């Protein structure tokens, strides 16, 4: 029987045939797809005279089947994994790494690319073609094409080990999250928790075989409300300790040695390629360009945010003392008293807002916002196969009603799903032989689940998360590039957060909230007074939040620009780096690094600063919408053309200037954050 992953997908829009795929199909499919990709490379090498078309363009178009199958597999490994898939990932990952190295260390292929690159001034290439040529040439050089045979062998081995280690890191964090559950027997210990959260905790306990109790896990929708509302200091401390010692307990799931090994190998790899550090290597292909620029950027925000952050913490400590006689504010107290203070000051809390944010209505609101801005529409399509019953698939249509993309939405926590929220794709966009192959894009979140008595009601933070990930999805869905490697979110890492972060701004605007923020029981619209409170509260504790984000960026940069042999103790190193941003007492035994998946499992190593970098861009860009009207068609069309559709076709600073008419300025962000 034909492997469904290798056959032509006889599904709507050639979507992944999840209904036919079984775990045992992946390894043979990937093995065969690697052989197909190798055959395509051999055809490129057999062409007598290298040209842009028969070498660079052909290379970008090669390995498509392998790309699609790999995307399906690794997306499942993040959103719907199990022991079998994780075991398979450890087998498949080195195969893909070896294949990538086979291509990028192929001297014959590199010489062809280098020849085309050397003659680029004699060719009449478009801006997009020039970008592809430069990116292709650099990818060979940055992956060892200029190494001697001994160096190439060493690089292969380093890459193989790195792929395995980052998988191991993620598996350990997921295992720690999944195995933890804390049962509460006495309802008195739940004082302060809203009814909906208590009901959800009772539902978790029932699912875990302990009816009549309440259970808390380390999934965000369970952990965060407990830390925010539980009056019981003991409950908060217990959960805080479990959350902040993930993969740091000295057992088989401990990630400290994995981190040291990852850092050593990343540094070794960078040195092998002629770079001073992993940070130097990564930042060469970023808007920031080098570690000094990143450190200067983070330091400039640190100077402005720290005095305000110190005032924020003092204020919460004084409030806790006045309210409950608390002498020493600990880390497990901050969220709780901060929320009480916000409620007192603004007469606002998440539970007051939750009834206005029913998930289905918020999703509809996101769709309508996209329609008002860009003319696109979303049609649920039950014929499109999905990988889990909770996933919904949509066909997306453009202004003219033509097919634009496929969009998958996956919203609730499950044991097989890692924590957090992300956007991903199952198929990228490109134009080949005159045909526009449209993308298949997905967003994966971990939102508050419906209970027996209530639908899924989101916190305002979850609403902004949904808008954020949807902004990334728009970047993928509205891609209009020629080449897949430059299409959609395939942009510089410190530019990729612009579409996601700018989209969050609409959540604070009455004109947008009026579309979807309606009470789930009465249907009444959210009041102008509540919207005003949301806006007023937006800067609450902004100094503290900014400092926290900067601390993660500084830790990431410290890890990746320090000689690894100087990092003998992960806990001591983290503590030393975080000293200048820590405003609350250090809790012995806790460690953030061992679950810092962004930099040790995801692609954010030497790139965590990009969230703040992109905030500068998003605040500056949204000011234009604010001046002209948040649904202004001319501004929306310019953003679509120059940012969303353009992808990585040109340098981001060129694209941004085309949209904004000038370089970005940090003033808008500093104003928005209340830092000036």
Image (cartoon, grey):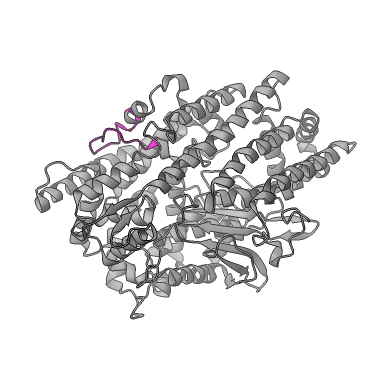
| Residue at 71%, 65% in the rendered image | 11
Query: Going by the image, does 183 lie left or right of 517?
Result: left
Whether residue 185 is visible, yes or no, is: yes
Examine the structure image and report whether residue 577 is included in the region drawn in magenta.
yes
| Residue at 73%, 42% in the rendered image | 31
Q: Position of residue 254 (x, y in %)?
A: 42, 33
Examine the structure image and report whether residue 124 is included in the region drawn in magenta.
no
Query: Going by the image, does 501 lie left or right of 638?
Result: left
Query: Going by the image, does 557 lie left or right of 16?
Result: left
- Up-down: is 15 above or below 239? below
Question: What type of secondary structure mainly makes up the magenta span?
Answer: loop
Q: Report which quarter residue 214 is drawn in.
A: bottom left
Quadrant for the N terminus in the image: bottom right
Q: Which range of residues does the magenta coloring cover?
A: 576-593
Query: Going by the image, does 39 lie left or right of 208?
Result: right
Q: Report which quarter residue 111 is drawn in.
A: top right
Q: How many marks?
A: 0
Along the viewing direction, whichever of 579 and 307 lies nearer the viewer: 579
Along the viewing direction, whichever of 542 and 568 lies nearer the viewer: 568
Q: Position of residue 316 (x, y in %)?
A: 19, 48
Along the viewing direction, whichever of 30 and 141 lies nearer the viewer: 30
């Amino acid at each position: 029987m034909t492997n469904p992953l290798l056959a032509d997908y006889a599904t709507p829009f050639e979507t992944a045939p999840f209904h036919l795929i079984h775990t045992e199909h992946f390894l043979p499919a990937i093995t065969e797809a690697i052989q197909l990709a190798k055959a395509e490379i051999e055809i490129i090498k057999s062409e007598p005279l290298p040209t842009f078309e028969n070498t660079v363009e052909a290379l970008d178009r090669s390995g498509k089947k392998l790309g699609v199958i790999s995307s399906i597999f690794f997306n499942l490994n993040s959103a719907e994994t199990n022991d079998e898939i994780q075991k398979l990932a450890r087998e498949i990952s080195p195969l893909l790494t070896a294949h990538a190295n086979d291509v990028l260390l192929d001297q014959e292929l590199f010489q062809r690319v280098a020849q085309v690159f050397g003659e680029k001034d004699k060719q009449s290439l478009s801006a997009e073609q020039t970008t592809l040529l430069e990116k292709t040439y650099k990818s060979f050089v940055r992956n060892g094409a200029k190494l001697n045979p001994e160096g190439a062998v060493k690089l292969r081995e380093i890459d193989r080990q790195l792929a395995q280690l980052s998988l191991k890191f993620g598996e350990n964090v997921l295992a720690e999250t999944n195995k933890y559950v804390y049962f509460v027997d006495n309802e008195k210990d739940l004082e302060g928790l809203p009814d909906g959260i208590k009901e959800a905790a009772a539902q978790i306990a029932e699912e875990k075989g302990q009816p009549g109790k309440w259970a808390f896990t380390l999934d965000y929708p369970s952990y965060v409300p407990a830390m925010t509302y539980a009056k019981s200091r003991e409950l908060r401390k217990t959960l805080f300790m479990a959350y902040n010692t993930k993969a740091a307990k000295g057992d088989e799931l401990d990630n400290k040695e994995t981190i040291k090994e990852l850092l050593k190998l990343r540094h070794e790899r960078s040195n092998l390629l002629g770079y001073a550090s992993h940070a130097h290597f990564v930042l060469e292909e970023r808007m920031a360009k080098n570690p000094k620029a990143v450190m200067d950027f983070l330091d400039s925000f640190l100077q402005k945010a720290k005095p305000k952050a110190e005032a924020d913490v003092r204020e919460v400590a004084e409030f806790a003392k006045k309210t409950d006689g608390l002498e020493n504010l600990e880390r497990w107290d901050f969220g709780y008293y901060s929320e009480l203070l916000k409620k007192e000051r603004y007469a606002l809390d998440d539970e007051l807002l939750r009834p206005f944010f029913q998930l289905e209505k918020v999703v509809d609101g996101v769709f309508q916002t996209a329609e008002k801005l860009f003319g696109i529409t979303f049609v649920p399509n039950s014929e499109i196969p999905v990988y889990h019953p909770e996933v919904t698939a949509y066909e997306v249509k453009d202004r003219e009603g033509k097919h634009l993309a496929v969009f998958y939405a996956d919203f609730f926590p499950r044991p097989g799903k890692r924590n957090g929220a992300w956007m991903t794709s199952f198929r990228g966009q490109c134009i080949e032989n005159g045909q526009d192959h449209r993308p298949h894009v997905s967003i994966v979140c971990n939102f508050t689940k419906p209970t027996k008595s209530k639908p899924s009601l989101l916190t305002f933070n979850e609403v902004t998360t949904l808008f954020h990930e949807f902004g990334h999805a728009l970047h993928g869905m509205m891609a209009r590039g020629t080449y897949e490697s430059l299409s959609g979110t395939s942009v510089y890492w410190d530019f990729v957060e612009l579409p996601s972060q700018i989209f969050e701004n609409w959540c604070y605007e009455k004109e947008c909230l009026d579309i979807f923020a309606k009470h789930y029981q009465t249907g009444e619209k959210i009041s102008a007074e509540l919207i005003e409170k949301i806006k007023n509260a937006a800067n609450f504790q902004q100094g503290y939040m900014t400092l926290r984000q900067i601390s993660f960026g500084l830790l990431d940069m410290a890890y990746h620009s320090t000689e690894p042999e100087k990092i003998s103790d992960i806990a001591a190193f983290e503590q030393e780096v975080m000293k200048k941003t820590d405003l609350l007492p250090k809790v012995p035994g806790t460690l953030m690094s061992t679950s810092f998946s962004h930099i040790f499992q995801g692609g954010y190593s030497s790139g965590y600063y990009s969230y703040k970098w992109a905030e500068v861009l998003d605040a500056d860009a949204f000011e234009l919408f604010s001046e002209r009207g948040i649904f202004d068609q001319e501004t929306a069309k310019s953003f679509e053309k120059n940012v969303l559709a353009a992808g990585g076709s040109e340098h981001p600073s060129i694209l941004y200037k085309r949209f904004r008419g000038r370089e970005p300025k940090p003033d808008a962000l500093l104003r928005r954050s209340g830092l000036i």
